[in-house]
Image: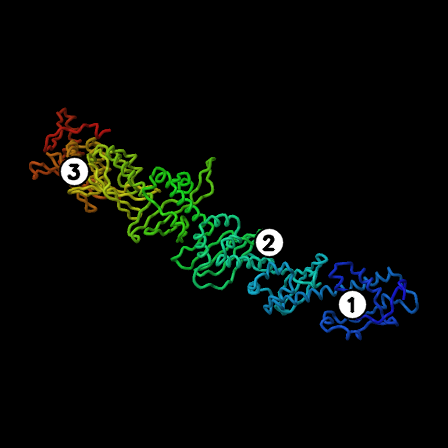
Amino acid sequence: MTQEEPFARTRAPSIFQLRVLIRSDQAHRVDTCRIATLKFDKLPFLDDGGLLDSTCHSQVPQDDLSFYPQKWTSIDLSSFIWLGQGTKFMPRTSRSLLFAAALGVMTAGCTNLMARRAIERFSEGLQAQNLEQLKESSSKEFEQYALRQPEAIGDLKLLKVPTGEVEIVSVEKISEGEKKALVKIGKKDKAKELEYRLTLNDTTGRWVVDDVIMKQDSGIGMVERSVTEQMNLLLSCREFLDAWKGGSRNEKLAYCAPELKSELEKLPPTWLHKLAEQVIGGGRNRTYRPDARMNNDKAVVVVPHPDGDLFLECRQSGDQWQITDLAVEPTSEDSTGIRSARKMASALNRSAEFLTAYAAENLESLKNTASPDFFEKCLSGADLSEVELPVPTLLSEKYEARQFPDRVELLLHGPQTTYMLTLKQIERDLEDGTKGAAVTRIDDVTLFENDGKEVKRLSALFLTQSVVSLYLDALRGRDITELKQLSSPDFNERVWDRPEATHFAIMPDPQIEDAAPEVISTVFRGDVSEVTLAVGDLPMTIVLTASRGWMVVDDVIMPAVGRPTSLKQNLEVMLSLHSFAMACGKGDLAELIRYSGDGLDRIVWRQLDETPGLTSQIVRPLLSEVLTVEISDPWIKVITSDGITAAETHLMREGSQIVVHDVVLISEASPEHRVELMGTLREMIAIGEIGPLAKRRRDIQQARGEIVEDAPVIQHADFTPIERSLYTE
C-alpha cells in the first residue's frame, strides 16, 4: 500500500478510537473538521462499504461507552465516504466537507450531553457533601475562590444551591473553552432554574463548573448572584475571624482594608490583642452561620457572637474581600458592645498619643490630641508634673472600653489608681469657615483612687486653684460679668442673670479681704470639687462643678450666725429685698408692684397712683446690716437694722420669684412700737389720707381755695438719708 492510495483497507476501528478523536479535538482546540478528516483518511471501513455498527461495542470499555448516546454507536460511514460500488472515490475536499457536516450534527448533541454530565457530577458532589468530588468537577478558579477551605462544603450548603435531577434548557457557547448552560434542577414540579458557567479543563479535556448564578431575594426584589463571589466573601470572613482568633499581628492586618489597617497597625500590641478579643468574643464559640447582604462591591456579613451579633462591613478589592469595619451588637443591656472597631481603634490611638505627649510635656502634641476646651482651659498653662500619670504601665496593660453615641470611655488600670479617658468627636473649623470632618479628641481624664471612693478629674485638679482665685477677685470687685462666666448655670439663674443683680454693687456682704487665699484641703466627688481655704481670717469653702468643659463655682459656703451659710441662698433673697428697697427710695410704683407679693400689690399699690411718703422712711433700715435670715419655704423672714430702727421683712416665693409680702418697722429702743407697712397703708387709704379719697378731698379743697396740708407721716427714728444717687442710678 503506497502513500498515494487515498484510503487504507484494514480492520474496522473501535468506537473507543472514535471517542479519542473527539476528545483530542477538544483538548487541543484545533479545527474539528480538519482533524476528523486527517484521522478519517487513516480510518478503515468494511470492505462492502457497509455500516460500522454496534457489533464493535464489545471492544469499548463499558464506562466509556456509556458516555455516548446509542445513536452515536452505529454510524453509516458509506453515506459520506463510500458513494457506490466501483473504484472511484469522491475528491478529498468534498469528502472532508461531508464528514465535517456530519460531525457538526454529532458535536451539537455532544455539547448538551457533556454540559449535562459536568453539571450532574458537580450536583452529585454537592449533594453528597464530597469536597474532593466538587473540586474534580470544578474549575481551578472556582476551587480557589469557593472551595479553598475544608469548611467550604458547609458554607455552600448555607447558600442552598439546588441539587437533584438535571434538565438542560439551553446551552450557549461563549468561546471555544467556555459555555453557559441554563438548567432546571430538582423534580419537575419543584425544579429551580439556575445558570451554570462551564469551562474546559485543558488537562483532562472535560467540561467543569466554573460558576453558578442563582436568583436570590435581596429584600427589595430578586437579584442574580454568583456562587463564586458569595463563597469568596464567606470564606474571606471565616479566614479573617480565624486570624483574629489566633493569628499573628500581620495575619490580623492582612484581611483589613487600608482605612481600618491604618488605625489598627498603630495600636500597642496589648491593645490590639484586647480589641481582637472583644471582636471575637470570649467564652464558648458559636456556630459560624453567616448571613450576607451584598450590593455590588460592598457587603455586610452578620455572624453569631458570644455576646450578640458581629457585623462585618466588607468591600471587594480586585478578587479579594477586605474588612472595612466591624461592630458588635450585644443582646445584654449591661454591655455597650462595639459600635465601630475603626472608631474604637482611632480612640485608642488618640489615647496612646495623648498619654505619650503628657508624659513628655509636649504641648504641641497635646494640642493635637486634646479637645480645644480641655487644652486651652486646663492643660496649656498647667504644671503637668503636679499630676503624674504612669504612662508606660498604662500602655502595656489591657484596657476596658465603653462606646456610647456621643463619647468613648477608656479605663486604664495603674498600680493603685484607675484612669478613665473620656473621648469625644470634635468638629474642626476649617480656614474657609466651614466645618471639617469630626476628629476624636480626649476631653478629660478622671482618676479613681482608694477603690473608687475618691474621684478626681484632671481638669478639676488643674483648674480649681485658678478658678477660685479669679472668683474671689470678682466678688471683691463686684464684677458681675466675670461672676457670670465663672458661675454654674444654677448660680446664674438664681442670682447673676437676674436684672436686680446690679444691686450687688452696693451690698455690704460678702466682705472679703484682699489677701492671697490659702488652700486648706480639696475634696473631689466626681464632677464636684470642694476647696476649703482661708482668706485672711475668713474661712470658706468654694464648691465647683464641671460645666461646658470648665470648672465653675456653684456656691460659696461661709460661716454665718442666724442666716444661711450659702452665698447663693443669701444673695437670692437679699437681691429681692434690695430691689424692693430701691423702688421705695425712687418712688417707682411699677417696681414696687414687681417686687411685692399679691396681697401688698392688690391691697395697697393698685389703689394708688403715686407712692406715699412712708415708703421712703423704710429704705435705710432695709439696706442696713443683716441680722438674721430664716428660710422655710415658701416663707422667708429677714431682719435688718440701722441701730435705731429694725426692719422685719416677710418674703415669699411666687413661682420662681421671691417677693416682699410685708415689712414691719420696729423701734430698737421700744420694741413694742411696731408699724406694719401693709396694715398702715391700708388704713391710710381707708380714712382718705392717701389713695382715691385723699385725692378727691384735695381736689375739693383746691376748688374752695383752701390750703392743702401734706398727709401726716410716721417716723420712729431720725437718720441721715442715704444718698439718692445710690438707688436712682
> Are there few (<14), some (14-19), or many (20+) residues within 10 Å of tag 2?
few
Q: Secondary structure at mark 2?
A: loop
Q: Residue at x 51, y 48 (%)?
A: 259
Q: Is residue 442 above or below residue 172?
A: above
Circle number at residue 626:
3
The residue type indicated by label 3 comes to: Val
Q: Residue at x 90, y 68 (%)?
A: 84
Q: Is residue 331 left or right of residue 450?
A: right
- Separation of disc 2 and disc 3 at Cα? 85 Å
Q: Is residue 699 left or right of residue 465?
A: left
Q: Is residue 423 left or right of residue 135?
A: left
Q: Secondary structure at mark 3?
A: strand
Q: Is residue 155 left or right of residue 461?
A: right
The residue that disc 1 covers is 18
Visible in this render: residue 298? yes
Visible in this render: residue 658? no
Res 680 → quadrant = top left
The residue that disc 2 covers is 319
Residue furthest toward the front?
A: 392
> Which sits in the foreground, 669 or 247?
247
The residue type indicated by label 2 comes to: Asp
For the C terminus, give its image quadrant: top left
Res 123 → quadrant = bottom right
Earlier in the chain: of badge 3 and badge 1, it is 1
> Which sits in the foreground, 434 or 608?
434
Q: Secondary structure at mark 1?
A: helix
Earlier in the chain: of badge 2 and badge 3, it is 2
Contact check, label 3 and label 1, Cβ < 8 Å: no
**Which label sits in the foreground, 3 or 1?**
1
